[in-house]
Amino acid sequence: MAARDWQKSSFSGEGNACLYVSSTDNATIRLRESDAPDTTLTTTPTTLRAFIRSAKAGHLDHLAEG
């Protein structure tokens, strides 16, 4: 996947810790962080939507505790 296919999140601002997203023709979403561009997370829109809703609702807060 070419660099031009990746779109930077509008929430990333101007720092180095940026999230990039890309979608493919087969309804797959790919995510990567600017610090590790060779590591890619691949998911579906439905799964990503459920993850984001869970995070916003606080259902994943226990994962950050420790």
Image (tube, rainbow, N blue to C red):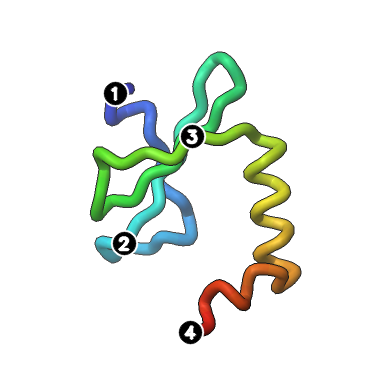
Nearer the observer, disc 3 or disc 4? 4
The residue labelled by disc 4 is 66
Residue at horizontal 35%, vertical 56%? Answer: 18
**Mark 3 and mark 1 in contact (Cβ < 8 Å)?**
no
Which residue type carries mark 2?
Answer: Ala
Residue at horizontal 28%, vertical 30%? Answer: 3
Q: Secondary structure at mark 1?
A: loop
User: Quick one: label 4 or label 2, which is nearer the N terminus?
Assistant: 2
Left or right: 42 with respect to 57?
left
Residue at horizontal 44%, vertical 40%? Answer: 41
Which residue type carries mark 1?
Answer: Ala
Q: Secondary structure at mark 2?
A: loop
Nearer the observer, disc 3 or disc 2? 3
How far separated are the C-alphas under marks 4 and 2?
22 Å
Nearer the observer, disc 1 or disc 4? 4
How far separated are the C-alphas under marks 1 and 4?
38 Å
Label annotation for residue 2: 1
How far separated are the C-alphas under marks 3 and 2?
19 Å
- In front of the other: 43 or 10: 43
Q: Secondary structure at mark 3?
A: strand
Which residue type carries mark 4?
Answer: Gly
User: Quick one: label 3 or label 2, which is nearer the N terminus?
Assistant: 2
Query: Residue 5 location in percent, x, y?
Result: 38, 27
- Residue 62 versus residue 55 in the image, above or below: below
The residue labelled by disc 2 is 17
Residue at horizontal 66%, vertical 53%? Answer: 51
User: Quick one: label 3 or label 4, which is nearer the N terminus?
Assistant: 3
- Residue 50 versus residue 27 in the image, above or below: below
Left or right: 48 with respect to 36?
right
